[in-house]
């Protein structure tokens, strides 16, 4: 199939398997959850009754004081005691094989293309690194406020001009992930990136 350029005449040939695949909602959901889980630090930690300091001596004798019996001041019932079900460092990552990951990306790109949220431009470059130049570029190409730009090779001026604009992200093909694709209303891809994506995700 061919994807037409929005800002120039002509088109670029891409693989049908990448930009015209069926949308697998369950697979995309699984990949997104796995990606977000992999970003969790999992460094939360608390101490159990065996890890807090002190508590080696019985606070008072077993009988005769009128108070409830106690064996250690580090019991979870005490203010300075340990935590009953203490949190420990853990790994939240979920295993996802390469075939599933690429299949989810194909489904996302295909759905973006069907919804006309995928825009092809012949290049993503600006003469000056000024926000005003980016805003003129966006207005000229009728782009939304929430835009993800994917470039075969990121132009420094374009990146600097757009980085202060809210809801605008500029990445290269190697930085593509399912979350960043779904987070923006519009995905703009240049010719070089389209060819790389088509080659990378083709079956």
Image (cartoon, rainbow, N blue to C red):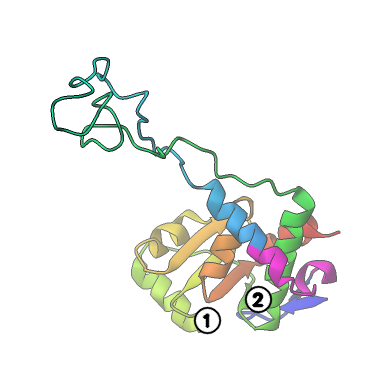
Disc 1 is placed on an element classified as loop
Residue 164 in the image: x percent, y percent?
34, 63
Please name the residue shown 76% across and 72% down the image.
Answer: 19
Q: In the visual, does 98 lie left or right of 180?
A: right
Q: Earlier in the sequence, mark 2 or mark 1?
A: 2
Of residue 26 and residue 79, the one placed in the foreground of this image is 79
Q: Is residue 99 magenta?
A: no
Q: From this viewpoint, which residue is outermost toward the top?
A: 57
Residue 52 in the image: x percent, y percent?
30, 24
Residue 62 in the image: x percent, y percent?
23, 23
Count the marks: how many?
Answer: 2
Quarter of the image for residue 17 reads bottom right
Identify residue for label 2.
112
Q: Which quadrant holds the C terminus? A: bottom right
**Whether residue 67 is situated above or below residue 196 in the rendered picture:** above
The stretch in magenta equals 14-29
Q: From this viewpoint, which residue is outermost toward the right?
A: 203
Identify residue for label 1.
141
Please name the residue shown 28% across and 24% down the image.
Answer: 71
**Whether residue 38 is situated above or below residue 56 in the rendered picture:** below
Of residue 44 and residue 122, the one placed in the foreground of this image is 44
Please name the residue shown 46% across and 77% down the image.
Answer: 138
Q: Which quadrant holds the N terminus? A: bottom right
Residue 151 seen anywhere in this rendered image of the structure: no
**Whether residue 142 is situated above or below residue 170 in the rendered picture:** below
Residue 4 seen anywhere in this rendered image of the structure: yes
Q: Is residue 25 magenta?
A: yes
Q: From this viewpoint, which residue is outermost toward the left?
A: 65
Please give the label number shown on residue 199.
Answer: none
Please name the residue shown 17% across and 21% down the image.
Answer: 60
- What's the distance in space between the residues labelled 2 and 1, CA to CA? 18 Å
């Amino acid at each position: 199939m061919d994807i037409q350029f929005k800002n120039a005449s002509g088109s670029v040939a891409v693989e049908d398997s990448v930009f015209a695949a069926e949308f697998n909602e369950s697979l995309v959901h699984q990949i997104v959850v796995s990606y977000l889980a992999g970003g969790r630090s999992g460094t939360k930690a608390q101490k159990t009754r065996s890890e807090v300091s002190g508590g080696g001596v019985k606070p008072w004798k077993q009988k005769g004081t009128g108070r409830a019996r106690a064996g250690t001041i580090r019991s979870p019932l005490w203010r300075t005691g340990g935590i009953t079900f203490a949190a420990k460092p853990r790994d939240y990552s979920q295993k996802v094989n390469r075939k599933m990951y690429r299949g989810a990306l194909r489904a996302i790109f295909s759905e973006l293309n069907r919804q006309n949220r995928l825009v092809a431009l012949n290049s993503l470059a600006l003469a000056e690194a000024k926000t005003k130049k980016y805003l003129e570029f966006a207005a000229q190409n009728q782009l939304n406020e929430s835009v993800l730009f994917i470039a075969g090779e990121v132009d420094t001026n374009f990146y600097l001009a757009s980085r202060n604009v809210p809801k605008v992200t500029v990445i290269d093909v190697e930085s593509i992930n399912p979350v960043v694709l779904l987070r923006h209303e519009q995905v703009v891809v240049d010719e070089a990136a389209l060819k790389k994506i088509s080659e990378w995700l083709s079956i």
